[in-house]
């Protein structure tokens, strides 16, 4: 190919949170990159999506672009109370005095993904990295010397490395011949954003309600974020999901669960059957293309491992590429990229398993899980540990993958 359109040694496909983090993490290591994005600049990215940002993610963002992690903290919200109900009755409630975490970074923060992306755009502007909008990657080739990319506008690009951060439908993943393997959730879930009522606010707590009478016995979760609430409903297997997610029904549900004043505050509704999948390889045969974020793995959101682990992928991809670019021998460069793949594939397996445990528990109709929940609900009045089990289990295990030295999701 000729007529190269960039001097940067690294191309990034996708300007979602993972692509933007990759560019910032490369810049922090002295490596310039070019971002190729399929969508137009004025696209709609509404929907709160990745609201729960782990402390480790905030620390990574703060490290690669000082001020970014703390900006998210300053504009985010830390809910202090965990609250769980069972068929209308409180079974667990605990309020924490301290935000946890270290220094300026709390244990987590809750901020809409739209805002996180806006702050990342500002960070890119500050360091002078442009996004090439309406420049979707269509074709990828690689060899021992580098990568060759064609974009939808007909341009050709050459670089030393390409990071595929182009989301769940990733063209880059398909072009390197990698395939998703895994499963799909049985149940549908409805996720809605509901605008907060600052004049008469609800208690600032994360609420999980098993078999909530307000929604005819479905499980409901309510999570606050700055300016709003995530309302999450687990459908029954035989539900008419479209009907349930209609504007009219969601308005009724918001009023029943949150109070009449919320009927007109539903801002965004989406329905999901969650995929639990990862690519069979995170790198190409030539060790020149790396997959990060949802191009590499899709997880059910329980435990909030999606974007959090994508940010970790991005940081580790940047670290591997920076070392590989400086390597004196090709074998050393290959080794760095393989190490990236080994670590992040291990992390993805761990995260998939953790999100899978949460999903299994929520959908669980096996008699042992059902009995365990019933018994815990019976005992919760007298034994806090039983209520805490019901409060904790919907999110799966809390720990990060056992990747030595990073502590990243
Ligand atoms: C309801 C819901 C709740 C969630 N909650 C959480 C949570 O609490 N915590 C959490 O960590 N995660 C959560 N997630 C997951 C999180 O939203 C995703 O993990 C995150 O958006 C993935 O980022 P990404 O950059 O990998 O992909 P995306 O955000 O999908 O970005 C990919 C980008 O690539 C672009 N693109 C696509 N094809 C091409 C191409 N051919 N060429 C160039 N560009 C291309 C797209 O336009 C897009 O800009 C949630 C998700 C959902 C749906």
Image (cartoon, rainbow, N blue to C red):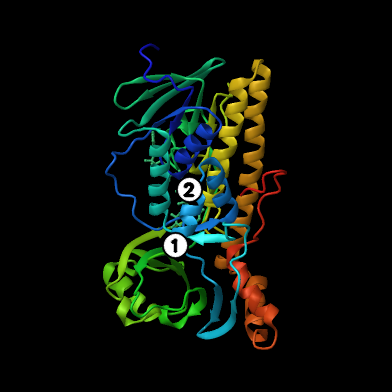
Q: Position of residue 398 (x, y in %)?
A: 64, 60
The residue furthest top is: 2
State the residue in front, 285 or 144: 144
Residue underneath mark 1 = 188
Q: Position of residue 181 (x, y in %)?
A: 56, 42
Is residue 145 positioned above or below 280 on the image?
above
Secondary structure category for the residue under label 2? helix
Residue 16 appears anywhere in the view: yes
> Is there CB contact under 8 Å for labels 2 and 1?
no
Is residue 149 positioned above or below 231 on the image?
above
Secondary structure category for the residue under label 1? loop
Disc 2 crowd, CA 10 A, few/some/many (<14, 14-19, 20+): many
State the residue in front, 239 or 333: 333
Instruction: Write the residue at 65% across / 61% down.
Output: 397
State the residue in front, 375 or 54: 54
Q: Position of residue 153 (x, y in %)?
A: 29, 25
Q: Quadrant of residue 120?
A: top left
Q: Position of residue 101 (x, y in %)?
A: 62, 60
The tally of labels here is 2
Instruction: Write the residue at 55% across / 24% down.
Output: 288
Which numbered disc flags the more N-terminal residue, 2 or 1? 2
Quadrant location of the N terminus in the rendered image: top left
Residue underneath mark 2 = 68
Alpha carbon distance from label 2 to label 1: 35 Å
Disc 1 crowd, CA 10 A, few/some/many (<14, 14-19, 20+): many
Q: Quadrant of residue 374?
A: bottom right
Instruction: Write the residue at 65% across / 27% down.
Output: 336
Q: Mark 2 against mark 1, which lies toward the viewer?
A: 2
Instruction: Write the residue at 42% across / 78% down.
Output: 202
């Amino acid at each position: 190919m000729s007529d190269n359109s960039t001097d940067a040694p690294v191309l990034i496909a996708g300007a979602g949170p993972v692509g933007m983090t990759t560019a910032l993490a490369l810049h922090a290591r002295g490596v310039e990159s070019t971002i190729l994005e399929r969508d137009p600049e004025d696209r709609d990215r509404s929907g709160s999506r990745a609201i729960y940002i782990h402390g480790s993610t905030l620390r990574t963002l703060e490290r690669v672009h000082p001020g970014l992690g703390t900006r998210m903290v300053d504009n985010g919200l830390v809910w202090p109370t965990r609250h769980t109900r069972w068929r209308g009755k409180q079974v667990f409630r605990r309020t924490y005095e301290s935000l946890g975490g270290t220094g300026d970074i709390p244990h987590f923060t809750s901020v809409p993904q739209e805002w996180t992306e806006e702050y990342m755009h500002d960070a890119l502007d500050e360091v002078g990295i442009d996004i090439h909008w309406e420049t979707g990657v269509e074709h990828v080739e690689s060899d021992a010397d580098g990568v060759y990319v064609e974009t939808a506008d007909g341009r050709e690009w050459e670089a030393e490395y390409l990071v595929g951060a182009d989301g769940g439908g990733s063209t880059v993943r398909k072009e390197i011949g990698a395939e998703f393997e895994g499963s799909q959730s049985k149940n549908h879930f409805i996720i809605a954003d509901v605008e907060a009522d600052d004049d008469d606010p609800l208690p600032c707590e994360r609420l999980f309600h098993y078999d909530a009478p307000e929604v005819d016995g479905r499980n409901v979760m309510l999570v606050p974020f700055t300016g709003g609430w995530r309302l999450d409903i687990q459908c029954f297997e035989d539900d008419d999901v479209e009907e349930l997610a209609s504007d009219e029904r969601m308005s009724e549900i918001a009023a029943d669960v949150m109070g009449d004043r919320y009927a007109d505050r539903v801002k965004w509704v989406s329905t999901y059957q969650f995929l639990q999948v990862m690519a069979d390889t995170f790198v190409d045969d030539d060790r020149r293309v790396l997959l990060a974020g949802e191009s590499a793995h899709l997880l059910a959101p329980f435990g909030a491992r999606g974007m959090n682990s994508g940010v970790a992928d991005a940081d580790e991809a940047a670290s591997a590429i920076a070392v590989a670019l400086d390597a004196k021998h090709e074998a050393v460069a290959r080794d760095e990229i393989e190490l990236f793949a080994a670590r992040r594939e291990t992390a993805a397996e761990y995260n998939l398993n953790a999100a899978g445990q949460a999903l299994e528990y929520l959908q669980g109709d096996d008699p042992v899980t059902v009995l365990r929940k019933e018994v815990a609900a019976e005992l919760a009045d007298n034994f806090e540990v039983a209520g805490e089990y019901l409060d904790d289990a919907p999110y799966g295990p809390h720990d990060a993958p056992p990747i030595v030295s990073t502590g990243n999701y």
